[in-house]
Amino acid sequence: MTTAAGVALVLGMVLAGLVVVLLLAVGLQHRQRTRTQARDARRRAELMPTVHALLDDDGDDPAPGPHVTSAPALLDELVLDLLPQLRGSDRRVLQRVLATRGVVDRAAADLTARAAWRRGRAATLLGSAAATDHTPALAACLTDRSADVRSAAARALGKAGDPASVAPLLVSLTGPRALPVGVVGMALLDLGIPVLPALRTALTEGSPPARALAAEVLGVHGDPLATSGLLALLQDRWQPTEVRRAAAAALGRIGSPLATAELTQLLATGPVPALQRVAAEALGRIGDPTGIPTLVSGLHATDPGVRAACADALAALGDEGRGRLRVLAIGTSPAGRAALSALDAVATARQWRRPVTPR
Amino acid sequence: MRELATDLVLALNWTVFGYVVVLDLTMLLLVLAGARRVAAGRRWKGAEGHDEIFASPLTPAVSVLVPAHDEEAGVLDTLAAALGQRYPALEVVLVDDGSTDRTFQLVADRYALREVVPHPTAALPVDGEVLSVHRATTGDPLTVIRKTSVGRRSDAVNAALNLARYPLVCMLDGDSLLESDALLRVARPFVEDPTQVVATGGVIRTANGALTDRGTVLEPRLSRNWLVRIQAVEYLRSFLLGRTGWADANALLIISGAFGLFRRDLLIEIGGLDPRSLAEDAELVVTLQEKLRRERRPHRVVFVPEPVCWTEVPETWQVLGRQRKRWAHGLGQLLWKHRRMMGNPRYGVVGTVALPFFLLFELLGPVVEVVGLASVVLSAGLGLLDVGTALLMVGLALALGTLLSTTTIAVEEFTFHRYRRGRDLLALLAAGVLENVGYRQVHAWFRLRGLAAALTRRAPVWTAMPRVGFVGGTPLPDAPADAGGQQAAGDQLTRVRS
């Protein structure tokens, strides 16, 4: 046998051995998992009456009994699964169970663990347990070396509900370890209306991404007190496009007619179609008839997206807007087609809303 | 002269052997890297729950684009799965691309379609004539475009893009079934990082043999057809692990055309899908990568290593051959079109690693494999073949290939565990061995023909795969895995014919 053949033989045997080991591992895992699933299902069924008893409790008892503290670890999983679905006193009861069983303290200690998944899981757990005592530690995790942990910390801050989290969350949008805007946005939304004043301040004092996000969240909340700040952003031509786009969309969501003039000007002179589209959509949401002439002009825009947005906005402006569309919905010009199409969409929507007559 | 021939043949044999070993080792490395990622994902799923994304007002709306040509066998199930997605805001745009069967009629009857004036949001060029546009009057957010076919899927997708209204577009094959939260899963990266993520894709698996009901896969099962079983292993390796590895290196070149999510504004910017390409899914991603890297715009193409979509795969050698030839032809077109990126550090890992890998191991792979087989025959003819050594080398290559397949199946079992029946698992393992004996060699021949078609610049021909479809039935309560009487239960459930 040559040297090469000898090496091939040894390698082949090693590989065959690895294959056999893998096959055995797969078989064992399959069998083990089936058994574990059955055991967990049985134990969960045994623990559910304990959880139901806790939830049925009137909440006066400050500390869960020994049957809860000595229950197996699966109870923690059950409670953590249930927590996101609960509100009010039920939620507080289960949070207290987690604290009593030492789950919260262990998670807080895990925030500095070596493995990223442990830090991330700990942050997620602290968020679910609404542990506001740990806001500074979670805020420190916003600059963690792992992107997943940073996101988990942001989400946990949102769920924990401490308004003091707004500042570190907005700061985390910039820097070498910046967080994605969507993650911070969801956390800010979770924090609810107590953070609106801080967001209004961020419209003028934050970084460009913070200004854009603050505008977006204020719009989702429909905060009328933010109108002047948003208008200032919209009027400032030196603001980045993304900030102006977010401000325009927010003004549309708030629905204040005070924004109509600025939005019509943006639609008429907008530097990019993306801004014009958002302005048209916002005018449609506000529903102020003084925007109609500019929307009608927008039907002749070169960008098909702008034309479609203007037509949809006119259709949303009630009889007056739809009347203008009917006048324009003639011929095969792009404006006529856009008008016709918007009217068609209204007719189709009406058709399916009509109750079906039983045969 | 004989000495020279001997040296040549021996050199050829060793080159081919070395190539196969390097290819399998590279794949094994990719699989291990992907397995590490998948395993980490199972230990901790990350910060964002799907319930939060579903409830968030910041979740972007999605237009699901479904090109369909002669898809009467499964189009209603595909639409039911797409329209039944657990997603806050979506519309479905189905393109009946010159179907000669009852595709349109079935959809028109089910959704009470009404002809409307089209509402274009873009003006991408479309070669086929748009005959009419319809909207559902049943309350479903469904738009149907009827157009003449020019024999290219890309043309149908571009027609749908012109009518898509939402910031994200999802491309879905007309014979694919989505899991109920598939969109939530693949949209998650867009929600978390809306400024950088430009495309996402998920794991596609074989639907043949699965138990389904009105567009929902109730229980994944393996088909009894060995060709389908081998493809199931292939899909697992490619989608579950190979792509996860590439995505981790930020060098993912393919988001499957069967199910992928893209930013609509970018697709419009690049002029839609290339109408001449036969590998339009890969072509789209590479074009996006080229443009964004050239313009130094930050971007990420993300792969979500979770099962999200089930699709029919060919059940006969003939159909498989056509499909794989088309894929190889498309890959050839793609690499030629983007040849300037090859080895160019300006394009980062995509230019320096991913594209050369695809050239060496994907495009040229079949050449080496077929030449290798021919050289063995030649060696035997010249009396140069040492049967013992040759068998050892073949055995080594087979062991490496089998290790690769078994690792893939082990990762599936340790992480997702979707095939609950022991017999399915055994069949997968057996298919992983069989793949290396016969299938791999025939597959190389199909790909070689595709490469030849690309080299001779033959006109691209898109041939639709004959669909077997999903058959309606009555769902039953969940039967326990590995329980007796499952067959009887299965017979009453909907099953993809296999």
Image (tube, coloured by chain):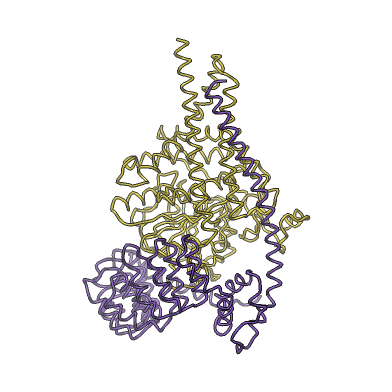
Near-viewer residue (B291 or B171):
B291
Residue A99 percent across, percent down from the top left: 55, 77
| Residue depicted at x 70% and y 58% | A35
Residue A339 percent across, percent down from the top left: 37, 70
Tell me if residue A13 comes above or below residue A205 in the rendering: above
Tell me if residue B169 comes above or below residue B334 in the rendering: below
Tell me if residue B93 comes above or below residue A349 in the rendering: above
Tell me if residue A171 comes above or below residue B392 in the rendering: below
Near-viewer residue (A153 or B309):
A153
Residue B163 percent across, percent down from the top left: 42, 62
Quarter containing the N terminus of chain B: top left
Q: Colour of chain A?
A: purple
Query: Which quadrant holds residue B435?
Result: top right
Relative to A310, B366 lies left or right: right
Query: Which quadrant holds residue A97?
Result: bottom right
Considering every residue shown, the one lying at the far top of the view is B1
Near-viewer residue (B38 or A342):
B38
Q: How many marks?
A: 0
Residue A60 percent across, percent down from the top left: 60, 89
Q: Colour of chain B?
A: yellow
